Structures are given as C-alpha cells and as structure tokens.
Amino acid sequence: MTVGATPTPGQSRLDLLGANAAILRPIVRELDRVAPDAIIILVSNPVDILTRIAIATSTRSEHLIFGSGTVLDTARLQYQLGKRLNVDKYDVHVPVIGEHGDSEFPVWSNAAIGMIPLTEFPLPKGTSLEQIQIELADVTRDRGNAIMQRKGHTSYGIATSVAQLVDAILRDEKRMFTVSVQIIHLLEHHPKLH
C-alpha cells in the first residue's frame, strides 16, 4: 500500500504522519470489507507507525499486515559494504533495524561476510572497521534524503524491495526480512522474551 501525501524536499517522514494516517484508515477499513484475508504491505511513510495504525484499524489478523520496514536500508548497507570490501552484496549479511529513518541502526554485532564475522574479515589497507561502520551507517540512514533532494521523490529502490517481499510471499520462500510487524503475539508465546 503506497497511499499518502506527496513529500516535499526537506520534509521528514514523521511530518507525513497526520495526513497519511487520515488517508490510510478508510482504505484499510474498505480492504477489510472486500478482501479480509489479503496480505497488506505498508510502504507509505512513516512506515513503522502507519503499520501500527493499520493493525489497530483493521479487523484482519495482525499476521496479515506488515510494513516494508528497513528492507531497503538493509539492502543499501549490504551493497555499500560489499562495494567497500570488494565482495558481492549477496554475501554481505548485516541487518538494519529500528524505525525506518533517523533512528535506524545497523546491527554490526551480527555482521558477516559469507560465514566470516565482519570483525574477522580482512579490510582494505588504510581503513579501520570503526571508520567503515560509522561512515556506512550515516550513508545508509541519509541515502533516502539525498535521493529526495536530487529527484524530489524516491521510488525505484523501495519498488525493488517491495517486489522482493511480494515474490517471497507468492513463492512461499520462507525468507527473513527486516519488516515492520507487531511483536506482541511473539512475546506472549516466548516467556524468555519478557
């Protein structure tokens, strides 16, 4: 679902919340009426908050609603790190989590190149791991804003990410993505997470 107000350069994702929530709610209600078992993927910003609003508004199972989360940010970071280390992006594993936007962050403690932890992977001469981590976290977080400033919109990156999500669902690939979900049901079934 990509409904929402058109962002303007300099406008934050959170600035879109009021307008986009007002647009989203009646659409979710109508989707509940005409397609109650359909999966809803939220893409509009601020995606994490709008996902919660869609879940709260909808009568369908919360398992059928999720947001694109940080899937695009994770892909951007994996591409940049692969480029920096001269390895294929598909061999780079480092999730970006948190709210899609200014508060997102890479989980460097889980970062690996293939099966090798990033902390053990040989780096290019003259670079430090800390330097790479700081620079790429900043580049990843700011990439959407940079594209917005140049083009006035972002579309191709997120379209590719959503296509991957849809493909994984249609093919029942059982892949893992850094999407926005409500995890309360997970906490109820896993006492160790309380």
Image (cartoon, rainbow, N blue to C red):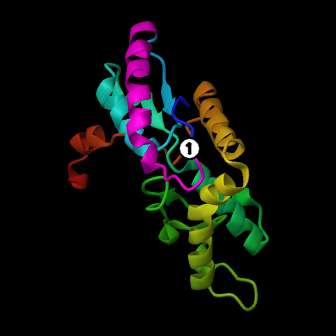
The image quarter in which residue 82 lies: bottom right
**25 left or right, relative to 122:** left
Residue drawn 69% across and 40% down? 160
**63 left or right, relative to 173:** left
**28 left or right, relative to 106:** left
Residue at the bottom extreme of this rendering: 126
Residue 93 position, x and y percent, is 61, 61
Mark 1 Cα shell of 10 Å, populated few (<14), some (14-19), many (≥20): some
Q: Is residue 127 above or below residue 176?
A: below
Residue drawn 72% across and 50% down? 151
To which residue does mark 1 refer?
7
Magenta stretch contains residue 135: no
The image quarter in which residue 62 lies: top left
* Residue stretch in magenta: 7-34
Instruction: Work out whether residue 193 can be spotted.
Output: yes
Dominant secondary structure (helix, strand or loop) of the stretch shown in magenta: helix
Q: Is residue 129 above or below residue 193?
A: below
